[in-house]
Image (cartoon, rainbow, N blue to C red):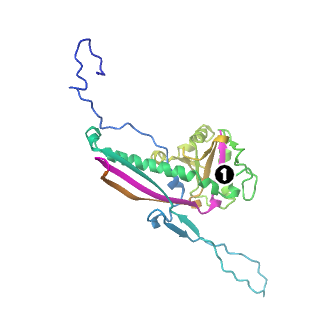
Amino acid sequence: MAYYPIAAGHPDYSGNFIPTIWSDKLNFKFYDASCARAISNQNWEGEIKDQGDKVIINNIPSVTIRDYTKGQTLQHERPEADPTELLIDQGKYWDVVLDDVDKAQSMKGFVNKWSSDASEQMKIAIDTDAFASIYADVHASNTGNSAGRKSGDISLGATGSPVTVSKVNILDYIVDCGTVLDEQNVPEDGRWFVMPAWMCGMIKKSDLKDATLSGDGTSMMRNGRLGMIDRFELYRSNLLSTYTADTATRCLFGHPNAWTFASQITKVERLRSETTFGEILRGLNVYGFKVTYPAAMGMLYATK
């Protein structure tokens, strides 16, 4: 059947003498921005080899400071701190096959395009996994309706009562989150804030709308970086955990030292299929993450 209109009685050669053309170009594809690596530390990533590995992280103990009176007997101390275990206990894979009979109809470099897409999809899957759980490990003083280690009167929202964010008050909430970290003595350098797209839109409508223009275009496309407000490097992400009952998003903020992330692609293989006439391309990525310093991370539980 011809796709181009033909006059009545004229022969239809489509599919017989007129070939169907398979384009060498793929339709453009958009990906959710990934930012887990940008907001965490990878201090122990080089020590992992394969899924199931465990890294023992030694923590710095706290030294007790005591009052001194001349002539008193000094009280000795042997500082100790329990180590933290980083388990590389999670893995994700991809496995695609290109049948031999389809090669003639496939675009050039088709397998390479699949590999590139798999890489992007892998980052999205791991980000989603991390954001779905790390919020539960933030310090108790860095979330809820009585946040603040010193003040205890900063409202960041809680299950059943999320804070309502608008273009009028969004900057106030960002500043409040900064105050929460200040009260935990978190370093100012390197602070980050991950928020959903709707919240980023409110910043652009607020009184500091130009503040979102401080980032470079390349990094914005690469990892959702927006700019800086009140010492926070802002990141946009559609992968943050949400709670449907409250229509709320668990917006995370903190410092890279709050949590560690380790990921390694351990296998990438290109081989012939044993069950069909075709070529297989597959890969395995193992990873692990852990909140190692809860006081350096907080959560704003927010809705529109």
Residue 91 coordinates in the image, percent (x, y):
47, 56
Q: Could you say which is closer to the camera, residue 255 or residue 243?
A: 243
Give the x, y percent position of residue 92: 46, 54
Residue furthest to the left: 17
Q: Does residue 22 appear left or right of residue 125 in this picture?
A: left
Please name the residue shown 34% across and 47% down the image: 97
Left or right: 3, with 199 as reference point: left
Q: At label 1, which amino acid type do we have?
A: Cys
Q: Quadrant of the N terminus?
A: top left
Magenta part, dominant SS: strand
Name the residue nearer the viewer: 264 or 43.
264
Along the viewing direction, whichever of 240 and 300 lies nearer the viewer: 240
Q: How many marks?
A: 1
Q: Residue at x 40, y 46 (%)?
A: 117
- Residue 238 magenta-drawn? no
Region of the chain picked out in magenta, as a range? 275-304
The residue sitting at 76% across, 87% down in the picture is 73
State whether residue 151 is above or below residue 99: below
Q: Residues within 10 Å of mark 1 (few under 14, many from 20)?
A: many
Residue at mark 1: 177
- Residue at 52%, 51% in the rendered image: 127
Magenta stretch holds residue 299: yes
User: In which quadrant will I find the C terminus?
Assistant: top right
296 left or right, relative to 146: left
As drawn, 278 above or below 166: below
236 and 301: which one is in front?
Answer: 301
List the single residue furthest toward the top: 8
Secondary structure beneath disc 1? helix
From the top left corner, tell me how far across and down residue 231 is, in percent.
60, 53
